[in-house]
Amino acid sequence: MKAKTIIGFFSIALITALAAVFIYAKFFQPEPEIVRVESQPSVRQISLPSAESRFTMDFTPAAEASVHAVVHVKTTAMMEAQINPLYEWFFGINPEEYRRPVMGFGSGVIISDDGYIVTNNHVIEGSDEIMITMNDRRDYKAELIGTDPFTDLALIKIDEKGLPTLQYGSSDDLQLGEWVLAVGNPYNLTSTVTAGIVSAKARNINIMRDELSIESFIQTDAAVNPGNSGGALVNTRGQLVGINTAIASRTGNYTGYSFAIPVSIVRKVVSDLMEYGEVQRAILGVQITNVTSELAAEEGLENTEGVYVADLTEGGAAKESGIKSGDVILSINDIKVNSASELQEQVSKYRPNDKVKVILKRKGDLKQYDVVLRNVEGNTDIVKTNRVLEILGARFETITNSEKRRLGIEHGIRVTSLGPGKFMKIGIKKGFIVTAVNKQPVDSVSDITNVLRNFEGGVIIEGVYRDGSKSYYAFGM
């Protein structure tokens, strides 16, 4: 009886509660707000400006101004077949009969209406014949005027007047993001024009291994392929701002970035080759490196600006003017330099005996020095074709005192490049440091020249390699 009473009360309470909830929901609960939830589309339409208000980059004037001044360079080099000497001796084979032509292709830029053309050194290097094809399909045989392996530039000439030319622009004024055109002959496809933007400046990509090489490339994303080497990089005004030289690629074809020698370097090299037949290279006489965060912390520098002077050449221009190891060079003639390649580019504009203003920071203090630049021989004279160096087939650079101490030598001058000549024939390698010639110590090119200028007979070369190993060589003059 008691249990039935409890169950009855519980049932009545449950029914009453359900009724109350129903009445509240029916008559007192507000209407729910309806919200539309939309998924965000992956592609959205935008309002485009009218055709009249839309900015359009027109490259046709620049292309028309440049395409006729860019030529197709074709080279021929006669290569000797490799024949076993015993086979030659037994059967009387003459290697000259087995010479075969090897063809090469590239581009060039006409920079004067009387036929001077600038191209890359690697385009014409080692060639026996150079042929030029104009945009209108006229063919000419070209004469080699001069080369500069340290900038990978060469100057050639054809016998013609009234040619279309490209005017020099300013590579210093180029801005990141600025449009440029690459004009050349990729894959023998003549008169090809591609467009891109300047994506970096003063880029060093380490493709030229010589100690005196200058790499301060303009990096662009204009499509450049084999055959474009030596062609023109022009701005939207149709002015020459660089010579296309290299691409960053794992395949040998264009994959996104190309590199051009800035016209500031081109103009100086061409002028020297036309006037002297040899580049008058100005030397500051410093061993430099970029200022990294690690170097700044190690040397107690305030920030990472400028270029750090790690060492100086004894008797060089910088040391004679008062610059010291540990200084940080900030500008050359009021143009800021923030990397080793930028500093090299600025110095390369000048000739020996030119004076430049160097602003640097030493222990937090700004200082200014007026530096009279010198040549590779350590003086301020104009360098003329050196018969001794032609015979040796070598180029040299001075070395720092710290390197001399490391190698345990008191004298020396380093071989930076080798061509056909005595040094290559007797097996001297690039990087070899010549300490003495015929027992006479040498520290400069003029020292070697003075010893060998009028010498006839046997020559003994003494020196060391970078690992400290000593070597001796001999040949006849």
Image (cartoon, helix red, strand yellow):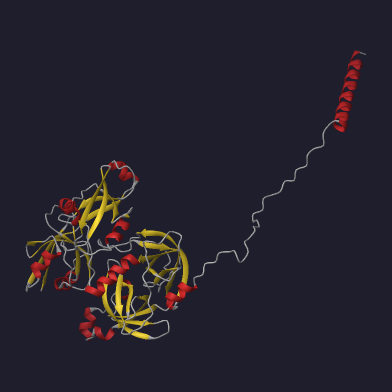
Choose between 108 and 355: the one closer to the eye: 355
Task: Judge whether 160 appears above or below 229 on screen.
Answer: below
- Which of the 4 quarters of the picture holds residue 126? bottom left
Q: Residue at x 35, y 60 (%)?
A: 205
Whether residue 398 is visible to the viewer of this picture, yes or no, is yes
- Which of the 4 quarters of the picture holds residue 349? bottom left
Task: Judge whether 178 appears above or below 456 on screen.
Answer: above
> Residue 475: image x %, image y %?
11, 71
Q: Which quadrant would the N terminus be assigned to in this image?
A: top right
In the picture provided, is 50 more to the left or to the right than 151?
right
In the picture provided, is 393 more to the left or to the right than 329?
left
Whether residue 255 is visible to the viewer of this picture, yes or no, is no
> Residue 444: image x %, image y %?
14, 62
Q: Residue at x 36, y 83 (%)?
A: 162
> Residue 289: image x %, image y %?
29, 52
> Residue 400: image x %, image y %?
18, 54
Q: How many marks?
A: 0
Choose between 82 and 397: the one closer to the eye: 397
- Which of the 4 quarters of the picture holds residue 101? bottom left
Furthest toward the top, the residue is 2
Q: Residue at x 27, y 60 (%)?
A: 347
Furthest toward the front, the residue is 52
Q: Which quadrant would the C terminus be assigned to in this image?
A: bottom left
